[in-house]
Image: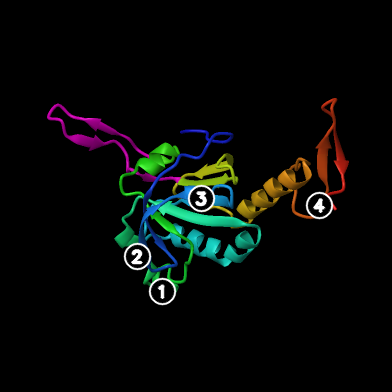
Amino acid sequence: MSVLVGKKAPSFSAKAVVNGEDIVDGFSLDQYLGKNHVLFFFYPKDFTFVCPTELHAFQAKLDEFEARGVKVVACSTDTEESHWGWLQMSKDNGGIEGLTYPIVADTSKTISANYGVLAGDYDVDEEGNLMATGPMIAYRGLFLIDKEGTVQHQVVNNFPLGRSVNEALRMVDALLHFEDKGEVCPANWEKGQDAMEESHSGVATYLSSH
């Protein structure tokens, strides 16, 4: 498992479904460099149970991310056709109709592998056949990437454990506060609360964030 915090987010170009209906070639996070922060998250599989709850939860908060200049992008190892088909199904039927943020198709599994969230590996048998040693799908990885393309926060959950979208939004607020004010954010800090300033002696003192 890779730790990408403090490193450049791995670049990629892949097919994706955007605006809930359009399949595009060559989708890349590079389009946001210098313009937007990015919340890039992986989920295991289309047409499952926990995954749509997360996908809908991010859509429900999408306006709040957008208001902060953050682009939300999802990714799984399913095909773009699978993504598209799932997007045509209503929420009542287990689908993800209504999602508008991009969903990347990591069919080669290289994006998941480069981000360190691919579950499983493969060996080659004596006949030269590839043999998977795991499901070869993505864990629930989430990466907050700044405008320069550097990963500032990551969290990776196992398959049964859904993520907190509110926590992801809190981390966005913390990063934006640090970038704007130069103040660091203590445990459980939330937007509007007091932050901290590190003195030259290394002792932190509380300052008002207003």
Dot placed on the residue nearer the N-terminal end, 4 or 3: 3
Where does label 3 land, which residue? 40
Amino acid under label 2? Answer: Trp
For numbered disc 4, what is the local secondary structure? loop
Pick the residue in front: 155 or 101: 101
Tag 3: residue type? Phe
Query: Left or right: 65 with respect to 1?
Result: right
Q: Name the residue carrying label 2.
A: 84
Find residue 165 and report its horizontal and vertical position in percent: 59, 56
Residue 9 x %, y %: 50, 40
- What is the magenta range? 119-139
Q: Which kind of residue does numbered mark 4 sit on? A: Gln
Looking at the picture, tell me which residue is in the foreground, 19 or 141.
Answer: 19
Helix, strand or loop at label 2? It is helix
Quadrant position of residue 133: top left
Q: CA distance from mark 4 to mark 2?
A: 41 Å
